[in-house]
Amino acid sequence: MEVDRAASAAAAGESSSAGAMAVEKPRFEALMPSEMSGGRPQFRKVPVPQHRFAPLKKAWMDIYTPVYEHMKIDIRMNLKARRVELKTRQDTPDVSNLQKCSDFVHAFMLGFDITDAVALLRLDDLYVDSFEIKDVKTLRGEHLSRAIGRLSGKGGKTKYAIENSTRTRIVIADTKIHILGSFVNIKVARDSLCSLILGSPAGKVYSKLRAVSARLAERY
């Protein structure tokens, strides 16, 4: 009798384990971006500086087309508030598209070309870093003018050399400097620009750039 009881208990245990294995885990479909915020659209507002109104008006279709058609984000110019407004749609494929479009428009406002700024929409690891000359060294009068001249070089030669060797884009707007690129490349470009601000001759910065660029090429 005891043997029969043990056998029936073992059979019951096997059937219960088989039943447990047969139970499937629940599967949930991925939420649409419009459903993540409770069905409410999300907004971003980018202020437009006075001196960027004319370039924005001229390049509006170049900004509108990739944002509206490719990223599926609504965009409009609010003339009264002087800002560009962005909003998600029902068919927006990814919620991060809104921030990408905001960064793209903001980069254009800082002075970057459309062809350079549009890379922010296509690549994930691009950033814009900004700093002022006074953050590096307090300069006034002609000393400040000479520092800005060293950053640009004759005909922009120094700026272009730094851009090409570090694969970044640089905008020098008065005493503000904006750099567009990947995290590592921005750091290399910023170090070179800081050296120039502190008074290093361009030749010394070029040789240092060549060494750093060679090291980066080996790494990747």
Image (tube, rainbow, N blue to C red):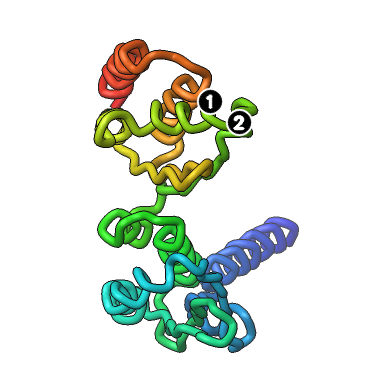
The crowd level at tag 2 (other Cα within 10 Å; few <14, some 14-19, many 20+) is few
Residue position marked by numbered label 2 in the rendering: 140
Q: Where is 163 relative to 27, above or below?
A: above
Q: Where is 37 relative to 162, above or below?
A: below
Residue position marked by numbered label 1 in the rendering: 143
Looking at the image, residue 202 sits to the left or right of residue 6; the answer is left
Residue at horizontal 31%, vertical 29%? 153
Tell which residue pokes out farthest to the right in this image: 2
Mark 2 and 1 residues: CB-CB less than 8 Å, in contact? yes
Kind of residue at badge 1? His
Query: In this rendering, does residue 184 appear at all?
Result: no
For the residue pair 69 and 114, the one nearer the viewer reads as 114
Q: Secondary structure at mark 1?
A: helix
Q: Where is 124 relative to 157, above or below?
A: below
Query: In this rendering, does residue 88 appear at all?
Result: yes
Location of residue 196 in the rendering, given as x and y in whole percent from the top left corner: 44, 22
Location of residue 217 in the rendering, given as x and y in whole percent from the top left corner: 26, 23
- Find the distance from the CA under tag 2 to the CA under tag 1: 6 Å
